[in-house]
Image: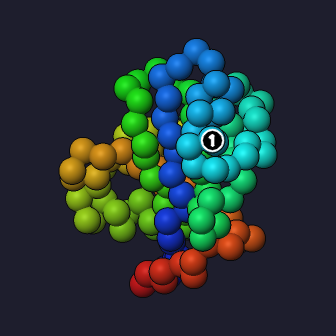
Amino acid sequence: MAHRSRLAGFIIDSQVDDLPAASAFWGAALGLKVTDPDDGGLGIYDKFEPGPGGLHIEVQKVKHEARVHLDIETDDIEAEVARLEALGAKRVQHVRNRWWVMEAPTGHRFCVVPMNEDSARAKPNRWP
C-alpha cells in the first residue's frame, strides 16, 4: 500500500531536572518561543513555535544521554517502519501505542510519528 512520509523536525533530548530552563536556553539560542509548555501534560515536553520551513521542534526531558533526534512523520506508521527496516533500521520501542523509536544502521535514534497534515512542511515523499 502506498504511503507518504517526510522530515517532521527534531527533538532536543535533555537530561535535566529543570525542563523550563532547558527550553529557555534552546528558545533563545534558536530564536523560537515555547508555545506549548508541558505539551501532553506529562512534564517532559516543551513545544516551540514552528521552526524554519514549518519544522516541529521541542525540548524533551530524558533519562538517557543528551542528544538530538529526528522525527519522520507518516500517514502509515507500520508501512514506514517496514520501509525503514528494509533499509537496515530496527525497532527499539513502541511509545504510547502511537509512534516507534527506531535505530538507524549508524546507531542514531529517530522516531516515526503520525503525520500532521496541517503543517507548512515540505510536500511528503510518496512511497510504493
- Residue 40 in sight from this viewpoint: no
Q: Please state if 36 lies on the left or on the right of 96 as rendered.
A: right
Q: Which residue is mark 1?
A: 28
User: At x 31% / y 59%, what residue is drawn?
Assistant: 85
Colour scheme of the rendered structure: rainbow
Q: Nearer the viewer, residue 15 or 92?
A: 15
User: At x 57% / y 81%, what residue is drawn?
Assistant: 123
Residue 93 lies in what quarter of the image? top left
| Image x and y of residue 84, in percent | 34, 63
| Image x and y of residue 116, in percent | 68, 65
Q: Nearer the viewer, residue 120 or 24?
A: 24
Split into 4 quadrants, where in the image is the C terminus? bottom left
Q: Please state if 50 lies on the left or on the right of 85 as rendered.
A: right
Picture layout, residue 95 above or below residue 3 = above
- Residue 82 in sight from this viewpoint: yes
Q: Please state if 116 lies on the left or on the right of 105 as rendered.
A: right
Q: Nearer the viewer, residue 42 or 69?
A: 69
Q: Please state if 61 lies on the left or on the right of 119 as rendered.
A: left
